Amino acid sequence: MTLTLESLRILDAIARRGSFAAAANELDRVPSALTYTVRKLEDDLDVLLFDRRGHRARLTPAGEELLSEGRHLLRAADALEQRVKRTATGCEAELRIVLDGLIPFERVVPLIAQFDREGTGTRLRISYEMLSGVWEALVSGRADLAVGAAYEGPDIVRMTGAYRTRLLCAVPWVFAVAPQHPLAAAPEPLEAQTIQQHRAVSVGDTGRTLQPVNTGLLGGQDTLTVPSMQAKLQAQLAGLGCGHLPRAVAAPYLRDGTLIEKRVAEPKPDTASQMAWRTDARGKSMKWLLARLSEPATQDLLFGVNEKETH
């Protein structure tokens, strides 16, 4: 007898119940059938799996090792069965979502909680990229859905018909510095030549193959490049440089005075933030997410564009 899932389930039931009779009752089998299966397995493996002395059937060390690994296989098989059943009902086994770094993860948590309450069983795999890296994750097949993608996307998105995009919102920006930064006391509006004399803090583009996105840095300006929007915020709070921040990200710090908004002669335009997905992605979980993301309440949850500042 080769090792089968059925034989592993029998071993598991005997070990949990403590006897062949109790395991047979749980599995709705006759005890003699379980005894035959175990003895055949022991003969084929040439090991003793149960110590049958005493009132309880106890696993031998070899039996414990087999069942320990076997239970991993049983769980994996059960999970696979459920995923297959979900797929048959139209729900994806997994959805891979790439988020732009403009979206703080704490704002995503309520959306995940709403999704969980739908009970689809679809696993979510969430990753972060910046700028062209968001598009790259989608077109390379590493993500099924991109949320917060900036600009209109590469040619493969705009021209092939293999992808769809939908505008989520326009993200407003604010030029902000720490109170101790030299620009905090500079007269407004700040001209480009004045800003150029001070180090900018910039989030690096995580794309590797697509054309990098121009983030509006001034030519010849010293730059501190950081890996995330949160890192950029922390650097500017520490006075390590200046730059634009999403207004929703900067708002709490503008209120408590740890950041100061400065008017600039050339303000950064609002960024059109989009979601994008493959046109052949038609599962129920994807449809649910697309519907939720199209709602203004969800967009405000993720981007905070309608949150009011109080001074």
Image (cartoon, rainbow, N blue to C red):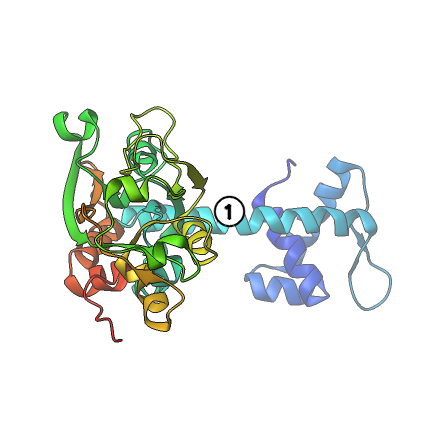
Query: Where is residue 254 drawn, in percent x and y?
Result: 33, 66
Q: Residue furthest bottom?
A: 311
Secondary element type, mark 1: helix
What type is the residue that disc 1 sits on?
Ala
Q: Is residue 274 above or below residue 211?
A: below
Query: Residue 50 appears in which quarter of the rendering?
Result: bottom right
- Residue at image coords 35%, 58%: 184
Please name whichever residue, 207 or 259, is drawn nearer the observer in this view of the structure.
Answer: 259
Question: In this view of the protein, can residue 117 be seen by the observer?
Answer: no
Q: Is residue 228 left or right of residue 174?
A: right
Q: Is residue 221 above or below residue 106?
A: above
Residue designated by label 1: 77
- Residue at image coords 49%, 51%: 78
Q: Is residue 201 above or below residue 103?
A: above
Query: Where is residue 186 drawn, in percent x and y?
Result: 31, 55
Query: Where is residue 179 drawn, in percent x and y?
Result: 40, 62
Q: Is residue 86 left or right of residue 222?
A: left
Q: Is residue 57 above or below residue 240?
A: below
